[in-house]
Every structure is written in C-alpha cells, then in structure tokens.
C-alpha cells in the first residue's frame, strides 16, 4: 500500500492484508490465521505413541504405519505378519484378524513393508515377501484386489510387467485414489488405479534402491532412494532433488505441502515450498528429537502431527512407535528481502522503518536497506556476494524502529533478519516505511547544513527526538479512538466506563461491556424509572425482572360531594388504619395512635413510594440471584423508595402466587430439599416415581388394592 496524501504522510505499509511483497524468503513462514512472519518451526518434542509395556505386548517389529485422517493409525508388524489399528485419542490397539498370518495364501502376508488407507477406509498392504499388493475392504476386510505375478501352481513369484512386483516396499495413495508402489527390486515406482484399471506411467526416475515414498497435494511425489542417498521430488512433472540430507530413510507430506524427511541418525529435516519456482523447495533445517536411531517410517496426522517408527540405536535397534511435534523449537535464523519499493521521487532520502513486532528476550531483528536510482532484478540482490546492504539497526526491543541509512535513491529494498534464542522466535506483524525524510534540520539556520558530514550527523541526531515526538503526535491525533466504545482497545474499556460512572460487572464479555458503554447515556435517561430498573436487573443480575408499583393496587374509593378531599366520604372500613375514634373504634388494644397520613390523604398514602421486583428463580439456588438483584435494586432505585424483592418460583399457588405474568411461572414439580424446600403444602410436593405415574395413567398401580390387585386369605 502506497499512501500519497501529503509529503509527510507518504509510506509503504506491508502486512498480511496489504501484502508482504516478499521477493526472497530464507527460513521464514506465515502463521495461521494471522499471517505474521516467524522463523521456520522445526520438529521436536517427541514422545512414545504408546507406553513401553503396551508396545512390547502388541508389537514385535513394526515396519510401516499410516494415518487414515479420522483419528486412527494403521501399523504393519513384519515379524507378526499382522495389521493393527491404533485409536490415537484413546491409545487402544485392535488387531485386524481378517488380514495376515504368515503364509502365501491370498489373505496371508510374508514380511510386509508398506501400508496405506484409501478414502473409503479400504486398507492396502505391500506384501513384500510374496511380491504382491493386496487391497482389503473397510470394516469386514474382504480381499478386493490382489496384484502380482503367480506361477503355474498359483504361488506368488516376482514379476517385471505392469502390476507385477519384485520386493514391493512402500505404498501410498493420493486424493484421487491412485495407488503408488515402490517396486524396490525393479527399481521403479508404479502408479495404479485402486480398481486395478490401466496404469498411468511415471517418468523414469533412474532409481537405484528406492525404499519409501509419500504423496502430497497436487500429485506431488517424494521418493527416498537409499542407493543414491537422495530424496527425489516430482511436482507438475518437474523432477528435483532435496539437498542437505545425509542417510535419508523415510518421508512424509503435511497438509500444507511441507516435506518431512527422517534420516538414519534420528533427525527430521523439513523442506518448505519456495516462492522461487526454479528451486521448488527450500531446506528449513533439521529438528532435534529425543531419540537416537534410524527413522524407519514417517506418517502425517492432521491432529497428532508426525508419527514415526524408530529403530533405536541405544535400545538394541528395537523398533518402537513415536509421535513428534512438527512445530518445536524455531530455526536459528531466517530472513526475507522485499520487492522494490518505489517512492516515485528521484534521489529520495528514505526516512525510517517502523516494525510492529514481538521480540522475546534473547531474540533480535536486524534491518538492512539498499537504495538505487534504477530497479534491480531479484536475482541481483539474491547473490550472496551482493554487498550493497547498509545496516540500519539490530534490535532486541519490542516494535523496533530505525532510520534508513542508505544514500538517497528512488527505489528501496529492505532485508529483515530474524534471530531466535533457540526456544522462541520473533514475530513480525507489520512493517511501515516512511519517506521522504522530513527532518527538524529544516527549521534551523542554513549554516547548520553547509558542511555535508555535519549536516548528515545532525539530521540523524535530530531524528532521534523526532521519532519520539512523532509517536506522541500519533497518539494525540488518534486520542478520539480511545473514547469510542467500538474502537478503543479492550484493556481501556474499564477506564472508559469510569469516565461515565458506569458500574462494570467483571463477568461481562467484551462485547457486552462495549454495548453497555455505548448505551450508557440512554440508560441514564431511564434511571430511577420502572423501565430503567428492569433493564438494570437484566444487565447486572442476568435475569428478566418485572417491577410492580404498589399504588397501582389501591382499592380505596372516595365519594366526593364537593369535589375535594375535605368534603369527601370514605368508602372503606375504619379499621384499615385503626385510628382511635370514640364510640366507633376505641377498644383498648385494637387501635393505634398515628399522625401519618392525614385523614384527608389516606386514599393516596397506601403503597406510596413502594414497589416489588419480581424475577424468575430456581427453587434450588434463588438465594444467590436474590442477593445480586437486591444489590442492583438498592443501587439504582430512587433514595426515597422502598423495595421488596420477590423471586418467582415455577409454580401457581392460589392466594399466594397467582398472577400469571407477574408472580407465577408454570413449571414442573420442585421436589423437597431439606433446608431449602421443606415446608409440606407450601413450597414442596411429595410425588410418586415416574414408573408409578405411568402405571396410574393406565389405571394400574404397583401397590396392593383390596379387591383389585390383592386377595385376603
């Protein structure tokens, strides 16, 4: 993104959304889903797939494994000639009894070395000793396909033709259910449809001693050739050789197209698809594991990562199953070079670079720059002998920034180098490059610019303070965002609520708090009213409330003769207020001496300034909710009013709780609970069991009834 609103606002902004504009990448990858740049994570943190006792009981010599993508791993045991299925989540092992057993019969195996699973769940076994490939159906594991040569007596023998094999070793399948077989004795790889239809030819790989292979997305194939000590990769018909590996033994693809290669020393090398088409894959490094030995086979599982069979050197070359975290410690260093950034200004003095980055302790980010008046090709700056880079800064601080130290030039390239501490990687979220340089030097007299060396030094020196002041100006210019409930950072929400004297509930979600702040002024307009109180109970206690003002229940009519209270006649009993009145209400002990209210306003006194808050509550835990409602009501109600809190239990009781929609909820029976619901006939009901209720509906009963279900004798 190139902004040109004004000279001081011109900048290039690089991130996942605007685009990183990476020309050359050496050892960095994008995080998901944020798209930030980090150092390549290397495999590590290995552990046994099953505990040692379980492995010893179930396996003798595991020789191959694969994942079906549904939480199961299938393992071949060459010594037992059996296939076993492992539930990776539970760690349980099941033997597929319908497959295997040593022999030459169609369903039997002889030292098998490869296994794969089709999308249908069918299991493919490379029956190495019998020179055959066999496909078994899912579930019942019926034999569907049996490829290979047989003699006159129908005994398996080696063959060289199509769908014939000599020591078939590894087997793999792709997304279209094509089967790939490493035909080790014939030094080739065959590609066969799962239904056995004609084979599509694979280009001559010139293999010497192939042993393992893996298939990735887009029909990418990786083959381990121990005879040439290489791994050969074919993508889009182009053959490439992965470099930097000694003694490769196994290979696997992950869902992103990365290639993992296990070697004979217990290391796992990772190769990442490169933006440079001519290279294809770049070597991201080797991950250290907890074992020392030959990695016999590798498999990728989307949930559990890398699965491996390891012949452990320090354990008598015993072969056991391991799982390996594909994203362990980061590589030591990595860098990327940006594409050309164009200022469109001849002899432009680029100003500074600002990073938005996390830099853990012990890690660092280095920024180098190169400027020129002509646009160079990527190949020129890729050359390791290119010496045009100018160091800007090497920093271990959060969000580092620096001045561009290169000479003026229209075009700019940046090289960023990330260095780890062996455990953590810097994480770069965005990059902002400002231009042209607008220095405070322009505000000084011209004499300060006469000497070129002094001018350059003074300009850089003043830029130190300018960077600090620019940061302050940036915060001031965007101060309004802090007072916007939608744009202020989450950590500032309590601070913004305090400006509005808004009481914050710590249990509120972020979205709820933003909504409360946004609606605070409207809520204050309703504060002290019935609607405001009901809304406050809903917001802070989390229950719907209904507020009933007592004056609405007055039943004290007045017959007016003169149109005023003084001339009116009361139409209610004098014992309502029990005032002392001679000859009519004067029995000692039955009256009360009161001065309020005055007789002429008795009709308006009952229920004045009083209200009840009804809210639905569970009979088993209403106390805590009632406390919350009480706290809210006491805080929000007008000071001169008196509130009564009434939890509404799910029942209908005539004369006690009987106004539907206000103090009654129609619900099920609330069974007796000691110290909570324990008053028979009032707040508890003794009911019968569900079984007895069902029998009663059928006019039956499990209890003896004389004359019906029992007989006296």
Image (cartoon, rainbow, N blue to C red):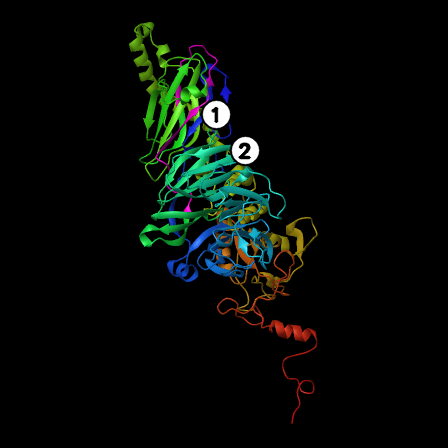
Total label count? 2
Q: Name the residue under label 2.
A: 237
Circle 1 sits in a helix, a strand or a loop, which is it?
Answer: loop
Q: Earlier in the sequence, mark 1 or mark 2?
A: 1
The residue beneath circle 1 is 21
Q: In terms of secondary structure, where does tag 2 sit?
A: loop
**Camera-nearest residue between 282 and 701:** 282
Q: Which mark is residue 503?
A: none
Q: Please check the rendered image and state whether residue 345 is part of the magenta-colored stretch, yes or no.
A: yes
Give the magenta range. 324-353
Q: Is residue 581 above or below residue 388?
A: below
Name which residue lies at 32% across and 26% down.
394
* Labels 1, 2: front one: 2
Q: Where is residue 700 in the image (x, y as percent from the top left)?
A: 68, 78
Q: How crowded is mark 2: few (under 14 residues within 10 Å), some or many (20 or more)?
A: few
Which quadrant of the figure has residue 703? bottom right
**Can residue 520 be spotted in the picture?**
yes
Q: In this view, does 423 lie to the left or right of 101?
A: left
Circle 1 packing at 10 Å, graded few (<14), some (14-19), many (20+), is: some
Q: In this view, does 518 lie to the left or right of 700?
A: left
Residue 304 picture location, percent across and down: 46, 49
Residue 490 pos. (x, y %)? 46, 38
């Amino acid at each position: 993104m190139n902004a040109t609103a004004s000279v001081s606002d011109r900048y290039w902004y690089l991130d996942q959304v605007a685009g990183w504009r990476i020309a050359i990448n050496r050892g960095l990858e994008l995080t998901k889903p944020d798209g930030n740049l980090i150092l390549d994570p290397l495999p590590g943190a290995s552990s046994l797939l099953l505990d040692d006792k379980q492995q010893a009981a179930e396996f003798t010599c595991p020789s191959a494994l694969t994942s079906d993508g549904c939480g199961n791993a299938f393992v071949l045991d060459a010594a037992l000639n059996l296939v076993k299925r492992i539930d990776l989540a539970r760690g349980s092992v099941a033997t597929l009894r319908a497959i295997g057993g040593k022999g030459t019969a169609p369903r039997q195996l002889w030292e098998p070395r490869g296994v794969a699973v089709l999308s249908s769940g069918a299991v493919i076994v490379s029956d190495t000793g019998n020179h055959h490939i066999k496909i078994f159906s899912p579930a019942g594991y019926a034999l569907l396909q049996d490829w290979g040569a047989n003699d006159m007596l129908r005994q398996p023998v080696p063959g060289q033709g199509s769908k014939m094999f000599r020591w078939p070793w590894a087997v793999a399948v792709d997304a279209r259910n094509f089967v790939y077989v490493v035909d080790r004795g014939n030094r080739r790889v065959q590609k066969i449809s799962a239904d056995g239809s004609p084979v599509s030819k694979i280009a001559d790989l010139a293999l010497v001693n192939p042993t393992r292979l893996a298939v990735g997305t887009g029909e990418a194939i990786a083959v381990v050739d121990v005879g040439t000590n290489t791994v050969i990769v074919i993508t889009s018909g182009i053959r490439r050789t992965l470099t930097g590996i000694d003694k490769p033994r196994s290979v696997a693809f992950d869902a992103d197209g990365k290639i993992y290669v296990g070697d004979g020393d217990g290391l796992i090398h990772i190769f990442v698809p490169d933006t440079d088409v001519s290279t294809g894959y770049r070597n991201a490094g080797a991950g250290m594991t907890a074992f020392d030995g030959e990695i016999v086979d590798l498999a990728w599982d989307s949930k559990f990562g890398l699965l491996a069979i390891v012949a452990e050197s320090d354990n008598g070359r015993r072969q056991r199953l391991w799982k390996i975290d594909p994203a362990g410690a980061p590589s030591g260093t990595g860098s990327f070079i940006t594409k050309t950034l164009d200022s469109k200004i001849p002899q432009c003095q680029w100003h500074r670079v600002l990073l938005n980055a996390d830099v853990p302790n012990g890690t660092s980010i280095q920024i180098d720059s190169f400027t020129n008046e002509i646009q160079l090709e990527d190949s020129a700056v890729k050359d390791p002998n290119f010496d045009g880079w100018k160091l800007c800064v090497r920093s271990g601080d959060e969000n580092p920034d620096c001045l561009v130290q290169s000479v003026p030039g229209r075009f700019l390239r940046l090289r960023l180098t990330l260095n780890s501490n062996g455990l953590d990687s810097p994480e770069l979220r965005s990059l902002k490059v400002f231009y042209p340089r607008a220095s405070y030097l322009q505000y000084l007299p011209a004499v300060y610019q006469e000497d070129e060396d002094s001018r350059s030094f003074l300009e850089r020196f003043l830029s130190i303070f300018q960077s600090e002041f620019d940061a302050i100006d940036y915060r001031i210019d965007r101060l309004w965002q802090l007072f916007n409930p939608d744009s202020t950072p989450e950590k500032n929400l309590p601070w913004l609520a305090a400006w509005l004297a808004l009481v914050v509930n710590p249990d509120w979600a972020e979205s709820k708090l933003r909504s409360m702040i946004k609606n605070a002024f409207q809520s204050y307009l309703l504060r002290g009213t019935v609607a405001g109180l009901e809304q406050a109970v809903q917001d802070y206690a989390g229950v719907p409330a209904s507020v009933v003002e007592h004056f609405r229940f007055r039943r004290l009519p007045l017959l007016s003769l003169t149109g005023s209270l003084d001339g009116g006649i009361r139409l209610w009993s004098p014992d309502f207020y029990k005032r002392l009145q001679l000859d009519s209400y004067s029995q000692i002990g039955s009256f009360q001496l009161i001065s309020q209210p005055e007789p002429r306003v008795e009709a308006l006194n009952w229920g004045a300034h009083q209200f009840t808050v009804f809210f639905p509550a569970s009979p088993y835990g209403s106390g805590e909710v009632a406390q919350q409602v009480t706290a809210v009501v006491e805080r929000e109600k007008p000071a001169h009013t008196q509130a009564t809190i009434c939890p509404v239990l799910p029942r209908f009781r005539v004369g006690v709780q009987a106004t539907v929609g206000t103090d009654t909820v129609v619900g099920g029976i609330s069974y007796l609970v000691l110290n909570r619901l324990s008053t028979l006939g009032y707040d508890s009901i003794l009911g019968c069991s569900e079984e007895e209720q069902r029998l009663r509906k059928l006019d039956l009963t499990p209890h003896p009834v004389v004359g019906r279900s029992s007989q006296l004798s």
